[in-house]
Amino acid sequence: MEKKFGKLVTSVGKNTKDLLQKSKNIAIQAVDQNDDGKFDLEDVSSMAATVGNAVKKGAQTFKETTDEKARQLELKALRPIFLETLNDTDFFMPKFIRITERDKKHAESEVCRGSIGFLSDQKELRIVNIFRDSIDSYGVSFYPDGDSELYYVDPSNRDEYIALDEYFSYLKQVRISELQRIAQDLGAKHFKVTYKEEKTSFSEKKVSKKVTAKSIASADVEENYEDKKYSITEIAAEMECPGHPPVKPVLKYMKYDPSIKGLVEMRMDRCFIKN
């Protein structure tokens, strides 16, 4: 029995020794960088180089990630517009735009290189700011020219913008001209276009009133009131015409004016009934 137990112990010892030797070999293989079957100074140098490269690669990846985050933050802050942005389905030209010089922060920013403008928001209103040196890139026209700063879209032409200072006078002129053409197309022998410009001024004046009520004594009370004034009506255009059978006019600026549409339809219907 003792002999069998001794053999068993010897066998276990041998197996343990073999296992330890295998573990040692595995460990040596793991650190043996030059495949010479042993762990030496050359392996240490090789491991140091491997670890160094991994650290460098990790640092480079971290730097690239950090740089990309900084780039995205700068893009979000400066909101540049590029030529390819105009072809983006999410981009649209708003009704209100601004033409401006290329400012320093957009000119010096790497992420804005090649930009033709930038977006900004003013009280929930999105504004496209166009760099003056890039106005030809947008494919829109400006009235009377591109020398002003603020523009609003032409109500009948989405690709034309009118300088804000000229907006109301411009619309007055084109509407009067269109009314003349409508009258001529409808075969009028005489027409007159009158233009009314209403102005309301608010005057603040103090008016004393004597107020008497039960339970209180008489008191002087001051009130404000509005003073409305209206401008004089002017004759914008008047002309004598030979007259002719009506031709249905093409409406542009008066397209959505119900009184003009009604006049055209009435005149054309009357002509149709006669014929």
Image (cartoon, rainbow, N blue to C red):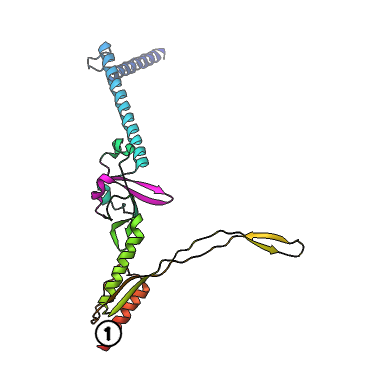
Q: Residue at image x 34%, y 14%?
A: 17
Q: Residue 23 lies in what quarter of the image? A: top left
Is residue 24 depicted above or below 101 in this figure?
above
Q: Position of residue 1 (x, y in %)?
A: 41, 15
For numbered disc 1, what is the local secondary structure? helix
Observer-nearest of 41 and 26: 41
The residue lying at 32 percent from left, 37 percent from top is 104
Residue type marked 1: Cys
Q: Give the mark count.
A: 1
Other-residue count near label 1 (Cα within 10 Å), few / some / many at <14 / 14–19 / ≥20: some
In this view of the protein, can residue 248 be seen by the observer?
A: no
Outermost residue, top side: 41
The residue drawn where x is 28% and y is 22% is 53
Magenta run includes residue 25: no
Quarter-of-image position of residue 161: bottom left
Q: Which residue is mark 1?
A: 271
Q: Position of residue 270 (x, y in %)?
A: 30, 85
Where residue 121 appears, x then y in whole percent? 39, 48
Residue extending farthest right: 215
Query: In the displayed structure, would residue 101 be above or below residue 48?
Result: below
- Residue 13 sits in which quadrant? top left
Which one is nearer the viewer's eye here, 59 or 75?
A: 75
**Eyeballing the image, is 13 above or below 75?**
above
- In the image, is 268 to the left or to the right of 222? left
Is residue 159 or residue 56 the one in the foreground? 159
Q: Closer to the camera, 9 or 150?
A: 150
Q: Which residues are magenta?
A: 114-141
x%, y% of residue 219?
71, 60
Instruction: Let me know if residue 127 is in the magenta part.
Output: yes
The reply to whether residue 13 is visible in this rendering is: yes
Quarter of the image with the C terminus in it: bottom left
